[in-house]
Amino acid sequence: MIVRDVHEILEAWAPKEIAWERDNVGLQVGSMLRRVQKILVSLDVTDEVVREAREKKIDLIISHHPLLFHPVKSVSGEDRVGRLIHELAKNGISLYAAHTNLDFAEGGVSFALAGRLGLRNTGFLQKDQFILKKVVVFVPADHIESVAAAMADAGAGRIGQYDNCSFRTRGTGTFKPLAGAKPLIGAKGRMEKVEEVSHPYDEVAYDVYNLSNPSASHGSGAIGELPREMPLSKFLAHLTRTLRIPGLRFRGNLRAKIRRVAVCGGSGSGYLQAAIQRGADAFVTADVTYHVFQESDGRIALIDTGHFETEQPIVPHLVGYLKGQLARRRERVGVFPSNRMKNFVQYYNS
C-alpha cells in the first residue's frame, strides 16, 4: 500500500472538494508513492507527535489540523513549521491533513462529538454544502448499461438513500466527421443525422452541471437527542465527565430542561442561529466570544467546552474507519492514535 491508496480511502469519506476554500488539506509532506506500513492519527502535528512517529517507525501521519495552513515563504529550521517539516522529511514520514473536509463530512468531527456525548437520532445541524454535479454523457446505445454501471461504481447516481440513479432519453444526434476522424457511423466530410438514445462519438461527449441543491452527505455541525431529558446542571456535569475537562464556559438557566442538543466541533459559534432555529435546547461548541454568548439571549443554553475537547473524539473515530477500510482491502497496515496529543490551552484552579 502507498500513500495514494490511503488518500483514496480518505477522499471516499471526506473529499477535498467540500473543504473550506481557504483551507489546505491533503498531502503536505512526502510523496503519494511512498509505501505505508504504519499510520499515526493525531489532532495536531507537534514535536512530541513527530518524535512518537519516529519511535514507532511511522510512515504516514494523518493530522486533523494542517501543519501548512498559511503560505510558507521559507522552510527554515529556526521556526516551528520549518523545524517540523525538516524532521518529517529527514525521517521519511509523510504528512496528510484532513481538516474542514472532515468537519463537513457525514460521520465527521461533529458526529464523533455527538457520539461521545451519547446523542441519538443524529443528523446534520445545517446542510450547506453545494458540491453536487449533474453529469450528462453520450455513448453508443449498446454501451449504455456498461457505462452506467461504471459511473455508478465510481459514485455517480447517488441521491439520498438510492444509488444507480439515472435518466435516459432518446434524441437526434448530428455530426460531420472531419479529416483525421475515425467515425463509427457516417463518412468524412458528410453531415449525419441519427435517431438514437445516445451517440457513438469518436470523441467522448459529456456535460457537467453545477447543482444548487445541497448535498445529503455533507454539511455543518450535528444535532440529536439525549436518551433522556436532564436539567442543564446535570448536562454540564455530563460534559465535563465525558470530555474529561476541569471546567467549561456557558450561558443558560441551570434548571432548564435539556433533551435536544446541537454540537459543532471546533470554532462553531457561527451556527448558533441554526441551533436555535432547529429547536435545540443546548448548543455545544468552542471558541465562543463574549458577544456570541450575549446573542444567545436566553433562547438556548450555549456551552463552550474547548477546541481540543470538541475535536479530539474524531481521532479514535478516524482510526476505526481506517482499520475497517484496510481490513476490507486485506492490507496489513497498522493504524495508531497518537498518545502524545496535547491541548495547548491549560486550566488553572486555585
Image (tube, rainbow, N blue to C red):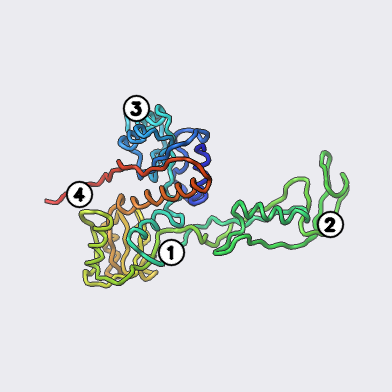
Q: Inspect the image, locate mark 3, and give the three-letter code of the amino acid beneath it.
A: Gly
Name the disc covering residue 68, or none: none
User: Does residue 264 sit above or below 1 in this rendering?
Assistant: below
Of marks 3 and 2, which one's residue comes earlier in the chain? 3
Mark pair 3, 2: CA separation: 66 Å
Between the residue at mark 1 and the residue at mark 2, the CA separation in whole angstroms equals 48 Å
Circle 4 packing at 10 Å, graded few (<14), some (14-19), many (20+), is few
Mark 3 or mark 4, earlier in chain:
3
**Where is residue 149 drawn, in percent x and y?**
67, 55
Crowding at mark 1 (Cα within 10 Å: few <14, some 14-19, many 20+): many
Q: Toward which corner of the image does residue 271 lie, by quadrant?
A: bottom left
Dot 3 and dot 4 residues touching (CB under 8 Å): no
* Residue placed under numbered mark 1 in the picture: 123
Q: Which mark is drawn over residue 77?
A: 3
Disc 2 residue type? Answer: Val
First-in-chain label (4 vs 1): 1
Kindly identify the residue that appears in the image at 32 percent across and 33 percent down: 51
Q: Which residue is mark 2?
A: 194
Say whether disc 2 or disc 4 marks the residue closer to the N-terminus. 2
For the residues marked 2 and 4, what is the alpha-carbon distance in whole angstroms? 75 Å
